[in-house]
Amino acid sequence: MTSSDTLTVGADTFVSADDLARRTIRRTDYVSCNTAFIDCRMPGSETKENYSIIGSGVTQNPDQVINLEEPHGFNIGAAAMPTGVNNNLHLHFTAEVFLNFRGDWRLRWGVDGEHELDFHEGAIVTVPTWIFRGFTNIGADNGWLFTALGFDNTGGIIWGPSIVRGAREHGLYLRADNQLIDTQAGGVVDADTDLIAPMSDDEVSKLRRWTPEQMRSRIVAPDDLLWSQHPFLCSELPGGRAQFAQVVGYGMTEDRDQVPPVHYPHNFNLGWLRADTGEGLLTHRHQSSQALIVYRGRWRVTLNHLGTRTSVEIGPDDTLSVPAGAWRRFEVISDEPGQIAVVNGGDGRVHLEWADEVRDMAREKDWAQDAAGYVAPWAVVRTSVLDD
C-alpha cells in the first residue's frame, strides 16, 4: 500500500499519517464557488458562496472544488452569505440539514416561500424533502452555515419555476443532468440541448405542505438540547467525561434514556459532543463513516491503537473525516471548553466498541455495556458478559 492508503485488516482499519492529513480539511482549505447554482446572478443572490467539503453535495457547477470526494453515505458542505443575501426557493430529494455556526437566518418555505421562521447561532435545522425552501441572512454580519446532505448521490435540486425562468434572463441554464450552462462564460444552448423545464403548476400543487408548528419541531436550538451526563462507557473516567446531545437520529449514544428530537431517516445521524479541557472520548471505534466539524475549542484526535497511533489537532470550522473501523480518541486541548458536531453514516444506532483498557477501567467504576450496547452497572450485567 502507499503511505496515503487506509488499510483494513479484519475489523481493524489502520490510518496512516498521510491519509489522516488528507482527511483533515482546514477552514483555509475550503474553496468557494460563486457560480454553483442558477440563481447566482439574480439580484440579492450574487454574493453567496458555496463549498463542497465532503462529496459534491448539490452543486450544479462541474468546476466546483471538492475537498474530499470519498463516499461517506452523506455530504458535508457550507454556505457563506453576507447580510441581506438570499438563497432562493428550491427543493431537495434527500435530507438537507443546516448547522448554524455564525449568524441570524430566516428560513422560508412553501410554494411561494409564504412561511418563515428565524434561527440563530448554534441551531441545527433539518428541512423536509420535497418542499421548496430558501434562506436569508438577516443578521448584521456575514453568516456561515455548514450543511449535511443525505446519501452520496443527492439527486441534485429542483428550483422554483420563477427561479428557472429568471436565471435564463441572466444567461444561466440547467441541463437535464443538472449541470449548469453559463452562456456568459461561453456555454452554448441550442436546439439539441436537453434542458430542465420549470415544474408545472400541477406538479407544484401536489408538493407536501408543512405548517410553522411542524417546522419548528425540526429546528433544534441550543436551549432545546438535552445533554446526557453519562452518554458513554468512559463517562466517569479521566479524559472521557464528554457530554452528548442528540439532534438527528439515535446516533452513538450509550445512554438508553436519550431520545433524539428528530427521528426521520436521513441516511446519517447527527449530534453535539462537548467537553472541558483535557476531557473528551477515550479510545473506541465503530463501523460507520464519520465526520467531525469543530464548533468551539481545539481538539486532538488520535487514530489507530497502541504503537500505531497518529494524531492531528483541529480547531473552529475545521472538518475531519474518520473512516469506519478506525480506532479513535478525542480530547479538548484548548483552555476553553470544546464542542463539535458529529455526523455518522446510516440511520440506525452506532454501536461503539471500546479498547480493552477502557472496558477494564470502566468495570472498576462498576460500569459496562449491556447486551444492547447501553451503559449499565457491571454488578448487574456481569453474568451476561463474563465470557466476552
Image (cartoon, rainbow, N blue to C red):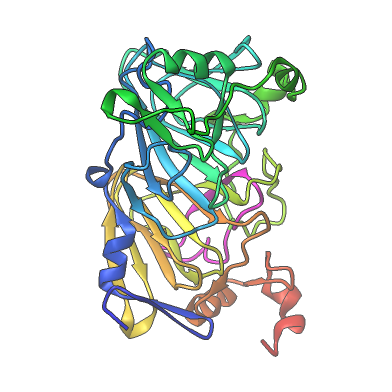
Q: Nearer the viewer, residue 65 or 84?
A: 65
**Among the 4 quarters of the image, the one containing residue 24:** bottom left
Q: Nearer the viewer, residue 198 or 98?
A: 198
Vertical side of 200 occupied by 346: above or below: below
Q: Position of residue 51 (x, y in %)?
A: 35, 38
Q: Position of residue 106 (x, y in %)?
A: 50, 16
**Residue at (53, 74) in percent of width and height:** 354
Vertical side of 227 occupied by 89: above or below: above
Q: Position of residue 12 (x, y in %)?
A: 48, 81
Check the picture and name the quadrant holding the C terminus: bottom right
**Residue at (25, 70) in percent of width and height:** 18
**Among the 4 quarters of the image, the one containing residue 181:** top left
Task: Tell me which secondary structure the magenta stretch mostly adopts.
Answer: loop
**Residue at (57, 73) in percent of width and height:** 353
Q: Position of residue 267 (x, y in %)?
A: 62, 51
Q: Is residue 93 on the magenta stretch?
A: no
Q: Is residue 363 visible?
A: yes
Q: Is residue 105 visible?
A: no
Check the picture and name the quadrant holding the N terminus: bottom left
- Taking the image as shown, residue 50 lies to the left or right of residue 289, namely left
Q: Which residue extends farthest front?
A: 191
Residue interval drawn in magenta: 232-252
Q: Which residue extends farthest bottom?
A: 387
Q: Is residue 238 on the magenta stretch?
A: yes
**Among the 4 quarters of the image, the one containing residue 230:** bottom right
**Residue at (46, 13) in percent of width and height:** 166
Q: Nearer the viewer, residue 42 or 112?
A: 42
